Image (spheres, grey):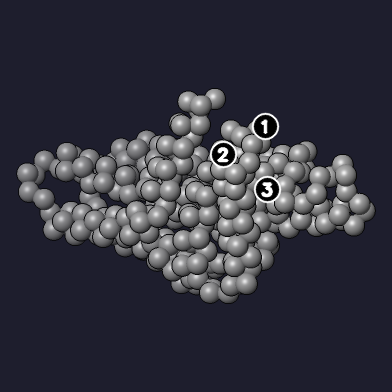
Amino acid sequence: MMFSSVVPLVQLQLKYLSNLGLQLIKWNAKRHQFFSTGSNQRNIRLVLGTLFVIVLNGFYTIFLQRHHARSLVQLFTAAFATALAITSTILCKPDPFVYLMNMTIQFEAKCFPKLESAPLWKIDYMSGWRLALWFCCWSTLLVSIVGPSCVIAITLYQPNLPPFLGSMLPIWENDTPCAAVMHMAVSLYQAWTLYVLGIAFSLAVGHIFFGILLSVTMYITSLTRTLGWNSSSKISKIGIQYYKQVEILISHLNYCFRPVVLPAILLYAIAVNILNGQI
């Protein structure tokens, strides 16, 4: 199967998030499904509040100050604004995403095996799609760790760079010992926030959105291949039921991602293109 084969990677991503103090979603091995815990609201408010402060600081720097790294500040501000919009959806209301993953798993267990398939699928066709999905999920897992680490390295190298929290403190070179301790404490807290942001963002966009989108594309392609392989011109009852179930899955995918996530990604792409034109 497709999405069911990468459930261990989703569990690993959730475990990393749990180790950071946000036990958002759990896996029930007996029922073979995910469920939301509804806990850690305090930590969620801390993360979203910190990101909101970083975004506000970025806009303040862009519009009211003249910084020598203006383009870099604009790029980080646009990235954090996009990440804030996307991560807030899954951190505050994880239930629709949990339901979407469970729908996909149940579809693969109950509906997909009933589809009349040509023998070639079981070797070349299915393995190709599964390889693409594994590449998507492993690269997402890697990005969720490497991406925040690179940003944290930038903040440590240049702690007063806006829009990060260190820019709201006195300059590091002119600090008193007490202020230096404040810089270190803020850097540690900011690093925690960035790791939570990276993992939650990668979970929502990489594993859930692109993972299920690849799976749904494979489901539809499998149906068209079945119709082409079947010599009968009539569509079977199983094929109609299969298509209706895929249609429900697509509707819930749109429900989860169309209101906030997709517009945020589009706006970020537009902002990056504009900044590239300025540079």
Q: How many angstroms separate mark 1 from mark 3 (CA)?
A: 15 Å
First in sequence: mark 2 vs mark 1: 1
Under circle 1, the secondary element is loop
List x then y, in percent, for residue 229: 18, 39
- Determine which of the numbered discs, if any, sits on residue 74 in the image: 2
- Determine which of the numbered discs, if any, sits on residue 164 in the image: 3
Residue found at the very far right of the displayed protein: 177
Judge from the rendering whether residue 97 lies leftward or rightward of residue 183; answer left or right.
left
Q: Name the quadrant of the C terminus.
A: top right
Which of the 4 image quarters holds residue 266?
top left
Query: Can residue 147 be seen from the camera position used here?
Result: no
Judge from the rendering whether residue 197 lies leftward or rightward of residue 119; answer left or right.
right
Q: Say which amino acid is labelled 1.
A: His
Determine the residue positioned at 38% across, 45% down: 214
Category of crowding for the residue at label 1, using alpha-carbon neighbours closer than 10 angstroms: few (below 14), some (14–19), many (at least 20): few
Under circle 3, the secondary element is loop
Is label 2 or label 1 in front? 1
Under circle 2, the secondary element is helix
